[in-house]
Image: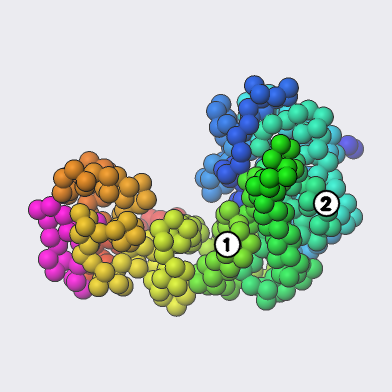
Amino acid sequence: MARSTIDKLTILADAAKYDASCASSGTSKRDSKNSKGIGSTEGMGICHSYAPDGRCISLLKVLLTNFCIFDCRYCVNRSSSNVERARFKPEELAALTLDFYKRNYIEGLFLSSGIIQSANYTMEQMVEVARILREDHHFAGYIHLKTIAEADPELIALAGQYADRLSVNIELPSDQGLKTFAPEKSGQTIRKAMADVKYRIDDRKEAQKSRLIKKAAAPKFAPGGQSTQMIVGADGAKDQDILSTANTLYSGYGLRRVYYSAYSPIPDASSDLPPQKPPLMREHRLYQADWMVRFYGFETSDVLSATTGGMFDLDVDPKLAWSLRHRDWFPMDINRATREQLLRVPGLGPTTVKKIISARRFSALGLEDLARMRVSLTKVRPFIIARGWSPGALVDLDNLRARFSPAPDQLSLFAA
């Protein structure tokens, strides 16, 4: 019996919940008022959906199909998995996206897929969804396509003409992990696909600068860049391995984002996969460490110096952990320190540092001024000197870390 669209959506939206790389940031702004179609990349009037772990999703995140010829052991859609299967036709999914957009449920489409028949056939089907939306319906909303690394580079090039962002999943942080859990995939093939996308993005940027085509717009190609996703906790990779791989991807392939997705146990899982998911806090610590490198001026080696046995402390954030291990940097005078130095202070982010540098031009700042900037004084007090405040030997206390650690939970005799 043929499945209804709702039945397919139920199966394929649920199957897509393991994809984390769906932020709609970084692309060019478009508005249907300036075109003859519909849709917008503005974030107004969006009805959000939520992943099981609470993350906010504002796109129609769905698979084209969860049929798959690959048998990746960590994937619920692997060929040997006993799950319900479904498949959208490109015209059907494009119509569904337009219907959702007109009802103000979504701001765009995040499309991934299992691999059917071949990588090229599947990629063609995904590109066709984007083509229908862009060319037949002049859809100006956001489109993120999860590309298939094994597909022909020309198909990925075509996908980049329609999509705001492309992503190629690195899956696991090491080639050895990939070989063990996804033997049909190749780290080399994945990195080559990333390199091809980077080349085309760079090529378009160069073309935009060219005097020869200034009057003719350069062909569009993934203005939101490319991203990837790494699964955390499925193999034995430590946090230091994950962050080092992310650093290589950022510097080598110009990625906009690396997403970290805590492994979720799946039905009928392989016996060598963990029976329980890793703490969600581990995923959170990796994101914090990622931001330290991207926005706070830390080198990856600095961040990794705060790990123990290659793992981040789950009780305190990586920046605080780094500060506790490098106390010779502190206390820091907030009225004299440079921007780069202030960004090393626990509790001070780029926005607050900007406010501090702006405000101290007029008068020396004290703790009360930081409080007005909504800075946590409990967190910064041991690490700074301010007007009327010096921490003395506070920063050298042996038990300083304990002040920031969460209180131990009292075990209950009646816990379930």
Report x, y in % for residue 12.
74, 44
Q: Disc count in the image?
A: 2
Count residues near mark 2 (Cα–Cα under 10 Å), then give few for <14, some for 14-19, many for 20+: some
- Tell which of 57 and 390 is nearer to you: 390
Residue tagged by mark 1? 250
Which residue is painted at 53% across and 49% down in the image?
53
First to last magenta residue range: 380-398
Report x, y in % for residue 111.
72, 44
Q: What element carries label 1?
A: helix
Quadrant in which the C terminus appears:
bottom left
Type of the residue with mark 1: Tyr
From the viewer's perspective, tell me whether residue 409 is left or right of residue 225: left
- The structure's colour scheme is rainbow
Type of the residue with mark 2: Leu
Q: Distance between the residues labelled 1 and 2?
A: 24 Å
N-term mark: 1 or 2: 2
- Tell which of 350 and 234 is nearer to you: 350
Magenta stretch holds residue 302: no
Report x, y in % for residue 98.
73, 28
Residue 251 visible in the displayed image: yes
As drawn, 19 above or below 137? below
Residue 119 visible in the displayed image: no
Which residue is painted at 40% across and 74% down in the image?
305
- Residue 70 tag number: none
Which residue is painted at 78% across and 51% down in the image?
157
- Residue 155 tag number: 2
